[in-house]
C-alpha cells in the first residue's frame, strides 16, 4: 500500500494537514475523514503545496468539510513556515492562491503576510441585522461579516452565527466574526470567528483577523499596529498603506497516511 507523507502545522491554533501537490489525490470524503478530530489526524483543513511560475509555491486550501476555499491566511503562514523549515530559508516568499499571489516577509522569526485583498466592502445592506447594528462586510481573500459587540465571550456562537453564515444575502455564504474592544487607547480587541467550511468556531482565522482590523479602522479609525487576540493567541495587523498580518506558527508533527 502506498503511503503519503504529511506535515501538521498550527497557526495560532488554526491547524492544518500539509501535503505536497504531487502526492495529492484525496477525495472530499477522505479530506473530511482525515480532518476528523476523533477518527482522523485532526485539523481545520488541508493545505496543498504546489509549484507555480513566478512564485515560490502555490497553495490550495480545503476546509475540514472537504470543500475547497479561495484563501486562508493562517494556512498560508503555515505553508511558508513549512517552506522555511523543509525547502529553503528566505527573507521573502511569494505564494500563489486561487485569489491572488501574496507576498510574505520573514522578519525576526515571524512571517508577515501582505494582505492585499480588500474586496466587496459593505456590498450588502447590513442594516437588516438589527441585533448587531455595527456590522461590516469585506472579502479579505474569503468573505467575512464582522460585528462590533460589547461582550464577545458571552455570545453563544454556535447558536447565533449559523443564521448569518448561511443567510441568503451572501450567495457563497460568509464567515462570521464578533469583535470586542478591550483597550481602545492601545488598539487591542478580542475576536471570535465562526468559519465557513469548518462550520464551527476556530481558534484563529487569518483572513478573519484582517477583516476585523478593517472593521476597527472603519468604525474607530484604528491604524498602524492593531492587536487582535482570539482563542489561539495574539496577532498583529500592521494597518497602513499596506496591511500586514502575523501570528505564531507551530510545527506539530509529521507522519504517513
Image (tube, helix red, strand yellow):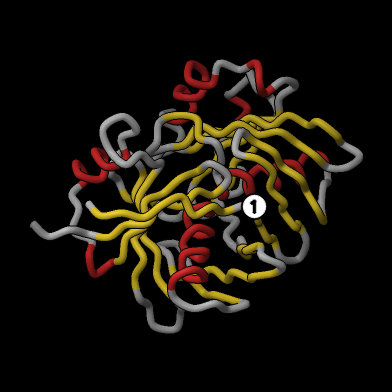
Is residue 118 shown left or right of residue 254?
right
- Residue 36 in sight from this viewpoint: yes
Q: How many marks?
A: 1
- 26 horizontally vs 217: left or right: left
Question: Which residue is drawn at the image coordinates 66% and 42% (left, top)?
Answer: 212
The residue drawn where x is 49% and y is 27% is 164
Residue beneath disc 1:
247
Q: Please determine whether, in this image, residue 253 is positioned above or below residue 181.
A: below
Secondary structure of the residue carrying tag 1 is loop
Displayed quadrant of residue 190: top right
- Where's residue 176, x and y in %? 54, 33
Percent of width and height locating residue 217: 77, 46
Up the image or down, 181 lies above or below 8; here it is above
- Pick the front one: 124 or 152: 152
Q: Quadrant of residue 89?
A: bottom right
User: With 221 as the anchor, is 167 left or right in this view?
Assistant: left
- Image quadrant holding the N terminus, namely bottom left
- Point out the residue furthest to the right here: 185
For the point 76% across and 66% down, the residue is 241
Residue 118 drawn at (x, y percent): 60, 56
- Picture coordinates of residue 195, whole percent (x, y): 47, 36
The extreme left residue here reads: 1
| Residue 214 visible in the current orientation | no
Q: At 61% from the left edge and 17% from the top edge, which residue is drawn?
A: 155
Amino acid at each position: 500500500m502506498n503511503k503519503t507523507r504529511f506535515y501538521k502545522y498550527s497557526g495560532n491554533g488554526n491547524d492544518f494537514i500539509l501535503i505536497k501537490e504531487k502526492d495529492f489525490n484525496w477525495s472530499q470524503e477522505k479530506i473530511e475523514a482525515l480532518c476528523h478530530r476523533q477518527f482522523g489526524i485532526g485539523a481545520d483543513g488541508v493545505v496543498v503545496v504546489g509549484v507555480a511560475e513566478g512564485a515560490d509555491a502555490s497553495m490550495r486550501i480545503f476546509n475540514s468539510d472537504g470543500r475547497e476555499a479561495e484563501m486562508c491566511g493562517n494556512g498560508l503562514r503555515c505553508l511558508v513556515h513549512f517552506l522555511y523549515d523543509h525547502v529553503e530559508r528566505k527573507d521573502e516568499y511569494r505564494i500563489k492562491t486561487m485569489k491572488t499571489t501574496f507576498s510574505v516577509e520573514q522578519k525576526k522569526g515571524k512571517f508577515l503576510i501582505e494582505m492585499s485583498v480588500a474586496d466587496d466592502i459593505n456590498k450588502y445592506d447590513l442594516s437588516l441585522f438589527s441585533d448587531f447594528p455595527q456590522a461590516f462586510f469585506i472579502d479579505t481573500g474569503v468573505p467575512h461579516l464582522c460585528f462590533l459587540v460589547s461582550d464577545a465571550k458571552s455570545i453563544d456562537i454556535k447558536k447565533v452565527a449559523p443564521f448569518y453564515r448561511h443567510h441568503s444575502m451572501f450567495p457563497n455564504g460568509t464567515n462570521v466574526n464578533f469583535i470586542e474592544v478591550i483597550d481602545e487607547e492601545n488598539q487591542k480587541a478580542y475576536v471570535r470567528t465562526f468559519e465557513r467550511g469548518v462550520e464551527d468556531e476556530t481558534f484563529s482565522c487569518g483572513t478573519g483577523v484582517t477583516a476585523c482590523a478593517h472593521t476597527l479602522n472603519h468604525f474607530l479609525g484604528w491604524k498602524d499596529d492593531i492587536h487582535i487576540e482570539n482563542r489561539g493567541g495574539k496577532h498583529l495587523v500592521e494597518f497602513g498603506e499596506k496591511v500586514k498580518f502575523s501570528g505564531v506558527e507551530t510545527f506539530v508533527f509529521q507522519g504517513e497516511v
